[in-house]
Amino acid sequence: MTPELSVVVPVFNEEAVLPELYRQLVPVLDEAAARWELVLVNDGSRDGSLAIMQSLRDEDERVTLINLSRNFGHQLAITAGMEHALGDAVVVMDADLQDPPEVILEMVARWREGFDVVYGVRSEREAETLFKRFTAAAFYRVLNALTPVQIPLDTGDFRLMSRRALDALSRMPERARFVRGMVAWLGFRQTGITFKRRARFAGRTKYPVSKMVGFAADSLISFSTVPLRIASTLGFVMSVGALGYFGYAASMKIMYGHTAPGWASLIAVIVLLGSAQLLCLGIIGEYVGRIYEEVKARPLFVVERLEQGAHE
Ligand code: UDP
Ligand code: MG
């Protein structure tokens, strides 16, 4: 028998929160569904997380353990979990209890009303730095301005998906996985639930600024070709400017018979053109590199060991 509800949790060095997560999840899941499974995805943790997950698995039949062969990153870890989840509805949540488990009850209720995607909207972000809040807000606004898909503001990866939405998602084979954008692209009946995002229960964030920048660039490039258009627009504007300047220089010569002493303007034009070309090449390179990654068509992740839960 398959479970009615699956909860997927990506885990990377979360030994400090795992027991508490399990303790808080079980009563919620018991209330939410008759048959449920907890899919724990170990994303190459280097601490005691795997041992804790293994003992949860050994004690509770409803726990599925997926051990990835190394650290593949948050987005691929949740992809692995969603791919192996068996439920009619699948919830994805972080291990750190920033997403309150009780919200799952509300999500399940909306799903039973007929929604295919129920995403969590963060109304407040307790104890997150001003910097993180500001950059996150700016990121979503820029992304929505540049992409045709409207990604709901202030959402993360805490969401419930119906079986058919999940099946549709798993038919998107791309490597650059910006899951929340892909889900927005899917369509179906979607709705949001606002909740207060809490502080991490324990442990530290796995998203330092460098990773956040990489994630933002990846999401933008995988969801939009607007940067490429910036390159061609820039080329167009510059050639109009160049033509104008050429006209000016020619008319000065014709009307007054002299040309401006040119060293400074020449250097300025050369440097400007050179840097604009490099910028455009760089933008194109970002896309070419990603095409290369996609074309290789490697598997998204490698499972070292899978212990599927049992459901009577
Ligand atoms: N995570 C993961 N692989 C990674 C980084 C993070 O599976 O390479 C997991 C992590 O264990 C947590 C979730 O992804 O369950 C979100 O990470 P985190 O809480 O550090 O991100 P933040 O909430 O600070 O954005
Ligand atoms: Mg977190």
Image (cartoon, rainbow, N blue to C red):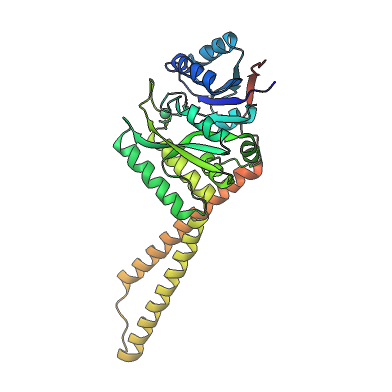
- Front residue (pair 275, 182): 182
Q: Tell me what residue is drawn at x 44 percent, y 54 percent.
A: 145
Residue farthest bottom in this picture: 255
Q: Is residue 85 left or right of residue 181?
A: right
Residue 24 in the image, given as x and y percentages of width and height: 45, 17
Residue farthest right in this picture: 1
Q: Is residue 88 left or right of residue 134?
A: right
The quadrant the C terminus occupies is top right
The quadrant the N terminus occupies is top right
- Front residue (pair 96, 290): 96
Q: Tell me what residue is drawn at x 43 percent, y 61 percent.
A: 276
- Front residue (pair 35, 121): 35
Residue 142 visible, this angle: yes
Residue 190 in the image, given as x and y percentages of width and height: 53, 42
Q: Could you say which quadrant of the image residue 247 lies in?
A: bottom left
Q: Is residue 133 left or right of residue 71?
A: left
Q: Quadrant of ligand 2?
A: top left
* Tally of marks: 0
Residue 54 in the image, given as x and y percentages of width and height: 56, 12
- Front residue (pair 125, 105): 105
Q: Tell me what residue is drawn at x 32 percent, y 91 percent.
A: 255
Residue 16 in the image, given as x and y percentages of width and height: 42, 16
Residue 73 visible, this angle: no
Q: Tell me what residue is drawn at x 36 percent, y 87 percent.
A: 251
